[in-house]
Image: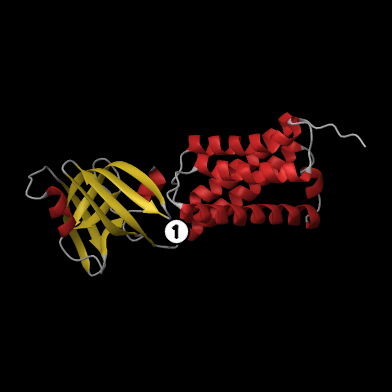
Amino acid sequence: MYYEVYVDSIFLMNFVMNFYLLLLVNHSTHRTSTWKRLVLGAAVGAGASVLPYMAGGSKAWLLGICTVTGTVVMILAAFRIKGIRAFIWIMERMLIYSFLLGGTFFFFIRYVPGARQLTEGIFGVMGMGAVICVAIYCHREREERKGNNSLCHAILIRKGGCMRVTALVDSGNTLIEPISGKPVCIVEQGVFDSLWREEKVPFRVIPYHSIGKDRGLLKGYVLSELQLEMGGMIKSFQNVYVAVCQEKISDGIKVLVNPMILKKS
């Protein structure tokens, strides 16, 4: 039996489906990657998928080796991973979303009338994949808005000082710097004193509203760099506004991260 294989079609389809998967995984990691790295990772994975055909064969063992190797390199290309635990965590998310995409795709083809005809051809497959990807992405967005807070480590950096503390991505923190419109993170007075010491620096007044106290004002300062370590991966933010809270935030938690900073990056 003779088969005619179009390598460019295989590459394109794998590239697009890999990009869908990486996009969903990136959402799970609070968008720790960039568009360029996601595209690079998808291209690497797609390139590995066509290697067996470029080598003149499609043996099962060769396909398996290229698939596993391509997946590993794709993850490393798409995400800045710190440690084996972070890699395993990303791999788990890749498998979950792979089964979710594949299972949903199979359900549509099997049980939805007319779906098989719509998915005929490479563009039909990619289009259906896009619909499923958008549906999963929107579902995660709704879950995120419900207020699923998460702990992480924060590294606060400015000239003459650096401090690593436990932080909370707090959905209740909606502070905005009124002039620039940038999201504001909250730090305890002790953190501010350690980084700024007795240095006199200009500040901006940031109004806030909280339960139990109608309104108030906080002093806001520009932090040179804020790094958040989530699941073994680090995401860096430049020139972040932080408001100083004179009261204790919580046991062990020194920083309240505004979740909007993750979406604006």
Colour scheme in the image? secondary structure
Quadrant that contains the C terminus: top left
In the image, 104 versus 53, the foreground residue is 53
Q: Is residue 10 left or right of residue 142?
A: right
Quadrant that contains the N terminus: top right
Q: x, y (%) of residue 25?
A: 53, 50
* Count of numbered circles on the image: 1
In the image, 50 versus 13, the foreground residue is 50
Q: Is residue 155 left or right of residue 221?
A: right
Report the residue at 55% width, 51% height from top: 137
The quadrant in which residue 230 appears is bottom left
Q: Which secondary structure, mark 1?
A: helix
The quadrant in which residue 97 appears is bottom right
Which residue in the structure is indicated by mark 1?
A: 145
Report the residue at 41% width, 47% height from top: 263
Q: x, y (%) of residue 203?
A: 14, 45
Q: x, y (%) of residue 260?
A: 37, 50
Query: Is any part of residue 7 visible from this angle?
Result: yes
Query: Is any part of residue 245 visible from this angle?
Result: no
Residue 117, placed above or below residue 191: above
